[in-house]
Amino acid sequence: MTIIMKKPLLSAAVLLLAAALCVVSLASDFRAMQEREPIYPGPGVTSVRMLSDWFPGIYGTPGDTEVYILEGKKPGSAMLVLGGTHANEPSGMLAATLLVENAQPEEGTLYVITHTNQTGFTCTDPQEAAPMRFTIDTPAGPRWFRYGSRASNPIYQWPDPEIYVHASSGQQLSGSETRNLNRAYPGRPDGTLTEKIAYAITELIRTEKIAVEVDLHEASPEYPTINAIVAHENAMGLASDSLINMQLEGMDISLEPSPKNLHGLSHREIGDFTDAYALLMETSNPAQGRLRGRTDEHLVVTGQDKFYLKAFGYGRLYVPYDENGHPISQRVARHVTGIAAFANSYTEMNLGGERGGINLGTLPGYEELESDIGPYLCPKA
Amino acid sequence: MLYLYLGIILFLLVLIVWNMMTEKNLMVQIDAALVIVPLVLRLLLIK
């Protein structure tokens, strides 16, 4: 089609102005993805450092992230909790945030990273139609949190190779796994951004002599390793004892050994390359499953999905599922209860010896959190 | 490498804007305006 303009300069100027408006609108929309939700450090937080303090190679990069340190009243062993390794598994980040805002350790030191792969919180996974954020109702009003991607933001690490070769083992995986932090351990100081983040965490564990490391995850209800602890062989005793205590609290959970031939995962490499007891927890998140229907905030928060209800009826799920779904309160409750149980078992089994135990103080119990996490995530003034 | 990349984008942008100013067909001008949007975002390293 041809429309000849008598005053082409005028139409060009109008179109340029329209293009400029589009640029401003799109740019501000895209920049908003970088906005971080506020975290309100509680009375137990004694200092906040950056992960780059343990590996300056990530200083000033989008991979740098806050490390919250909660020193107990009494010296003891150290524990590290990793939330937000995968930003599309929100209960890990929420459980870590809840610890930062509520825990007051009595003995030992608790290190918490709420956004372990910070760049994953600045984008969502392509073709998943996932929401950018979700809201938790608290007594002080709604509070928003970011829902992100399983992998590092490709803006900061691109292109992916055809095949991802894990550096220390030579294991080959799909190219997209090159941006998966939980396939990058123990990391490399001269590797990709994701490998550098993994290396910084490994350095933190070595330098601070972390005794227990817990990586918080979620998986889809049709995935076999779910509502489970995955433990390195060195940590099986600790995990077994903790599991009994969790079950006594009314929480159904299983224990899986860390596969020896699957490399790059925290429970394998941190157990192999450091002295820490390496543990990982999985809860059930229908919002990341393959069988889900509409993917929105409601699904993220309630875990209610009619297609998963059908799938359960056909016996396709590894966890019980009814019309109540798998609410995020329940998933956070599982993580927090697990962390408390690991600390208690570590102390009861005297695994710290002369260094002492880990006592995280009084944390809300499983049933209390399962009914509502809102009161423990109140925005502070 | 980054500056070479930015230089190519800037060169393309100048050509497209020049073409837009001198073109009399409105449809071609609209095409040019559409192409300008992603190029400016890349030039600013935003998207």
Image (cartoon, coloured by chain):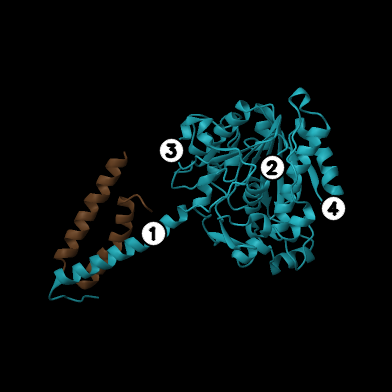
Chain colours: A cyan, B brown
Q: Position of residue B35 (x, y in %)?
A: 29, 61
Q: Position of residue A178 (x, y in %)?
A: 53, 41
Give the mark nearer the N terminus: 2 vs 3: 3
- Mark 1 and mark 2 in contact? Answer it, CB < 8 Å: no
Residue visible at 65% across and 32% down in the picture: A269
Q: Secondary structure at mark 4?
A: loop
Task: Have a look at marks 2 and 3 and say if they share a chain.
Answer: yes
Task: Have a look at marks 4 and 1 and say if they share a chain.
Answer: yes
Give the mark nearer the N terminus: 1 vs 2: 1
Q: Visible in this render: residue A202?
A: yes
Which chain is home to disc 4? A
User: Dot 2 corresponds to which residue?
Assistant: A104
Q: Amino acid at mark 4?
A: Gly
Q: Nearer the viewer, mark 1 or mark 2?
A: 2
Gap in angstroms between the C-alphas marked 2 and 3: 30 Å
Q: Amino acid at mark 3?
A: Gly
User: Dot 4 corresponds to which residue?
Assistant: A250
